[in-house]
Amino acid sequence: MKIYVPMDSAAKALGADEVAAKLTQEIAARGLEAEIVRNGTRGMIWLEPLVEIEKDGERLAYGPIAEEDVAALLDGQIETLGTVEDIPFFARQTRLTFERCGVIDPLSLDDYEAHGGLEGLKRAIGMSQDAIIDEVKTSGLRGRGGAGFPTGIKWDTVRLAHAPQKYIVCNADEGDSGTFADRMIMEGDPFTLIEGMAIAGLGCGATKGYVYTRSEYPDAVAVMRQAIEIARAAGVLGPNVLGCGRAFDMEVRVGAGAYVCGEETSLLNSLEGKRGVVRAKPPLPALEGFLGRPTVVNNVISLATVPVIFAKGAEHYANFGLGRSKGTMPIQIAGNVKFGGLFETAFGMPLGTLVNEVAGGTASGRPVKAVQVGGPLGAYLHTDQFDTPFGYEEFDGQKALIGHAGIVVFDDTADMLAMARFAMEFCAVESCGKCTPCRIGAVRGVETIDRIKEGDASAIPLLEDLCEVMTDGSLCALGGFTPYPVLSALRHFPEEFAPNTAQKEAAE
Amino acid sequence: MTPASSPQDDGAIAEIISQIIEGHAHLEGPLLPMLHALQEEFGVIHEAAHAPLCKALTITRAELKGVISFYHDFREKPAGKHVLKICRAEACQSMGGTALAERLLEKLGLDWHGTTPDGKLTVEPVYCLGLCACAPAAMVDEKLIARADEVRVEKALSAKNIGVSA
């Protein structure tokens, strides 16, 4: 008998370690023959800790399981949810990038290979650099960090650059509220990211990779570091990748609590040991990146999707999706929702379906008021916009963005003026200080919103003007996109920015 | 350097500092790993480390101070013995995180970044712990707390012998 208890941070934060400890104790006390496997999460966070028991070829799920439930679980007194694959939230998904996450032991390379791991890398080894890049281009894969830039074109730029050393840098600085896909894959299927980076290295002629992640993710850091050691010992990484005669190795670097380091040029400065200030572009990092050398900077999910593209073929991947948004997206459903978690699906599902059906509406049971998509720099969408299909261009058309695909749902108690103020406040706290529209604009933004709150209607056009300056004049997305949440709150919920009734009456 | 430390202590500290610097010198872009290791060892970035860092990396003191002050994580003054981090980001706000933070701060008699007079606890804001589907989130030292409420946070604090007054 095998018992799976996730070691994902979210599961642990909900008591998975205590459940595992209690299970170990009970198994010993009962003299049972059972092995406890610490897997990743299947992504249904409202069911965590989700325990799975594999017996007689069947793997049944139980959850949420508390420490106190363990005895009853082993006595067979807790009703099963069936297999994970039968749970409606899971059954509706198309799992490509996250296929193995939660299924396997994250630190077992054998388990990884038994579930299709390394097939992509083996195929890539037999391909020329040209063919590798063409495969990525054909797949239609675009940057999953938010910018949506075609990954194959970025790789090609690095491939064609002449330099003694090139780098693959994985942006795992997942600071956006409402997002946890990077953390989940690093904790649940780290070899996928390693394999994706190795393929990128072969394709671009880069022999060294870095995963730059957050100090707020200590578990992910630990799992990634262990996985890299295991991969190196097995010859997946090192001077002779799977015996192909070419080298690729990598290491993990940890940031130090600066949100702006998720911006690629800030990240590169930070990696070099400098202040994480933004660099002006050009030069592109693909030509002058880490230490001034050609560097691919890709998001975790972009790189972790590469193995499945190579294992199943670019056409297979490109068959999913909508328009220019090809493939699948791991959508992270968060905030005030009944069923929160990771939902990987082909692009194109309407936002309303995601919120009302998949997420089951709010946890509080109150009506949905607004949904922020794409992190703290993403717009607040109104329920009127719920028919918008989930895709890069489709959201752009709504003056919104999908970003890293986190969706945060708010019920009708949300104070939209306060949310707009928070967006400016956050920008002020996290601004790197390099450009004036962001550094000064965010502070003035907080003050201007405070004036609106006090009933000064003349501050509204001022706020709009300020947002225009920030959008057009900022060097990076922090200052440039902070107007998204601010203006969308203002546009869709104008009544909350209007001078309040009492002040109006007094004026009349 | 604290005035209380003896010259011998200074010598021992200098030795550890130089070991940490040497241990990371082979890395590309070694400064952040060095600073993390120094803080891990001492709880702060000792001023005694400034000169050896500048020498090893051929950077100026101003550049070094610029880096240390840029990142929220690096401390020049020690934090309390334990650290409570409360997430302030949007997903946690949607689940009552702001009110939770206000109540906890009030009970502890602290503001953000504040430390209790007995030096036991520092409270820091954090912007996202990646627990957005089980918000609000908090963290006591390395222990994550999802669906945090006053009871769960106070329980985690009392496990560290930190009482929270009403």
Image (cartoon, coloured by chain):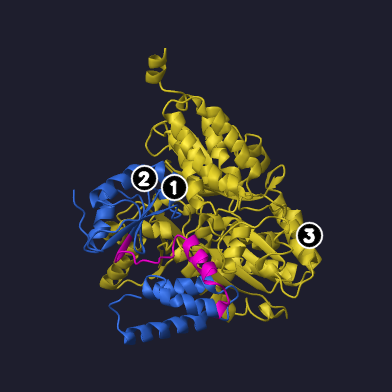
Marks 2/3 in contact by CB < 8 Å: the verdict is no
Q: Mark 3 points at which residue?
A: A134
Q: Colour of chain B?
A: blue
Query: Quick check: A305 left or right of A376?
Result: right
Residue A318 on image: x %, y % = 71, 51
**Does residue A48 show up?**
yes
Assess whether residue B65 is covered by the magenta stretch: yes
Query: Do the residues at discs 2 and 3 belong to one chain?
Result: no
Query: Quick check: B122 left or right of A421?
Result: left
The residue stretch that appears in magenta: B56-83
**Residue displayed at 55% across by 63% down:** A275
Q: Mark 1 points at which residue?
A: B89
User: Which mark is in front, 3 or 1?
Assistant: 1
Q: Nearer the viewer, residue A381 or A503?
A: A503
Mark 2 element type: helix
Mark 1 element type: loop
Chain identifier matching the yellow colour in the rendered picture = A
What subunit carries mark 3?
Answer: A
Marks 1/2 in contact by CB < 8 Å: the verdict is yes
Q: Amino acid under label 1?
A: Ala
Assess whether residue A439 is covered by the magenta stretch: no
Question: Relative to B37, does residue A506 appear above or below in the rendering?
Answer: above
